[in-house]
Amino acid sequence: MTFGRSGAASVVLNVGGARYSLSRELLKDFPLRRVSRLHGCRSERDVLEVCDDYDRERNEYFFDRHSEAFGFILLYVRGHGKLRFAPRMCELSFYNEMIYWGLEGAHLEYCCQRRLDDRMSDTYTFYSADEPGLLGRDEARPGGAEAAPSRRWLERMRRTFEEPTSSLAAQILASVSVVFVIVSMVVLCASTLPDWRAAAADNRSLDDRSRYSAVPGREPSGIIEAICIGWFTAECIVRFIISKNKCEFVKRPLNIIDLLAITPYYISVLMTVFTGENSQLQRAGVTLRVLRMMRIFWVIKLARHFIGLQTLGLTLKRCYREMVMLLVFICVAMAIFSALSQLLEHGLDLETSNKDFASIPAACWWVIISMTTVGYGDMYPITVPGRILGGVCVVSGIVLLALPITFIYHSFVQCYHELKFRSVRCSRSLSAEFLN
């Protein structure tokens, strides 16, 4: 702890009048994210960004929050019980306290999660950890009034690029970005058509063709591609410049996808300029085609502007444990059924053996399409024991796939309501902007 009274072996948390004493060693690795942030505070200004008030003499940190809710949360993080709603307290209010201290709805017991889902479904309400009014608090601090205009301008720019419904300019910017994504996808799909390539080849001579291949972008499709890439690059650079934390910006999944969508174009241009795409450099030509096909990542940029794709990504992020569990179920079933099917179809009777099941890896393909009930029919068992095993494999696949789906569905509903509330809150800000 770099801030606080020297020599003190513990700190005191005052939550709504209730005092809790924590040692410095425990504070460093405390499960609650907001409390553990106190360990890295180096000045009183940093402390006041985490808590509401601080008493240097008593080494006491004050949080103006619900004391009973914090008592339930503290018992849970210390391992003395399971996290359930506090009696006589609104589910949404308790959920708001959880988010403030750094917990999520997944930490609740299943029965309480269902209560929270039902309540959120009725009210379409979500309490975000990024509480409004933070800018006003900064202005109230010493020295905050001078920096308020620049902060307000940067915050408005960030909201314009990050929240498509925050203002009229954000909606226009989002619409233009969506148009560029759609145009780039249409050009990418059309460029793979044989008639498109034949028409492009007929419209230029052999000399022009070599010149075009040396400098991509002179063809109509190349010009459109260059314009789209220019827009995406400018948008990514501006968002990087106005971001609060540059390291956090680079780590975000959507920003990584932007880099994956933009970088291959510049690599392909450099490779084409320096090597060309001729018969002597077939490997370079294949590499260029692979890089150009990576433009398909552009379609994921739509996740910035559509709640459905955002909900899918957030659900996969929160349910990675359930997804890993689902993959483990499938792998275990594949190992068992593929070995049995190879034995029944190929290993028992070599004279009437099924050549499709000549090895266990080959049988794994049949197992996976049977468990997912796809059933292409390209390979199938011909013996009676093999068909019985196939039926058991299909039924087992339905059961194994259905077990983790409940948890994933629950998280999907929760993520949808969270993102829905953020969108509604930004829409209210847009309405207020029109009124003003």
Image (tube, rainbow, N blue to C red):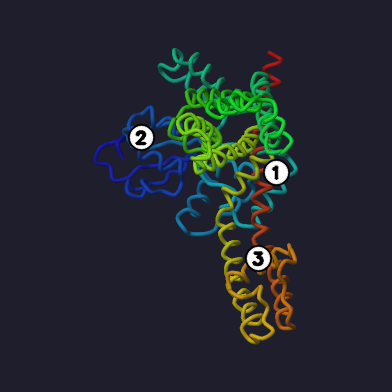
Give the mark toward the camera: 1 or 3. 3
The mark nearer the N terminus, 1 or 3, is 1
Q: Which mark is residue 120?
A: 1
| Side of 397 relative to 294 (left or right) | right
Query: Is label 1 in a helix, a strand or a loop?
Result: helix
Which quadrant holds residue 345?
bottom right
The image shows residue 105 at horizontal and vertical percentages of 59, 49
In the depicted structure, whether residue 151 falls above or below residue 345: above
How many neighbours does mark 3 have within 10 angstroms: few (below 14), some (14-19), or many (20 or more)?
Answer: many
The image shows residue 341 at horizontal and vertical percentages of 65, 77
The mark nearer the N terminus, 2 or 3, is 2
Q: Amino acid at mark 3?
A: Ile
State how far apart marks 2 and 1 are (Cα): 35 Å
Closer to the camera in the image, 164 or 366:
366
In the depicted structure, whether residue 383 falls above or below residue 110: below
Closer to the camera in the image, 173 or 408:
173
State how far apart marks 2 and 3 are (Cα): 52 Å
In the depicted structure, whether residue 388 falls above or below residue 405: below
Closer to the camera in the image, 431 or 35:
431
Give the mark toward the camera: 2 or 3. 3
| Side of 60 relative to 103 (left or right) | left
Mark 2, residue position: 41
The image shows residue 35 at horizontal and vertical percentages of 43, 42
Q: Residue drawn at (62%, 33%), measured in percent from left and top?
A: 304
Q: Amino acid at mark 2?
A: Cys
The image shows residue 327 at horizontal and vertical percentages of 58, 61
| Side of 361 relative to 427 (left or right) | left
Tally of marks: 3
Q: Amino acid at mark 1?
A: Met
Mark 3, residue position: 368
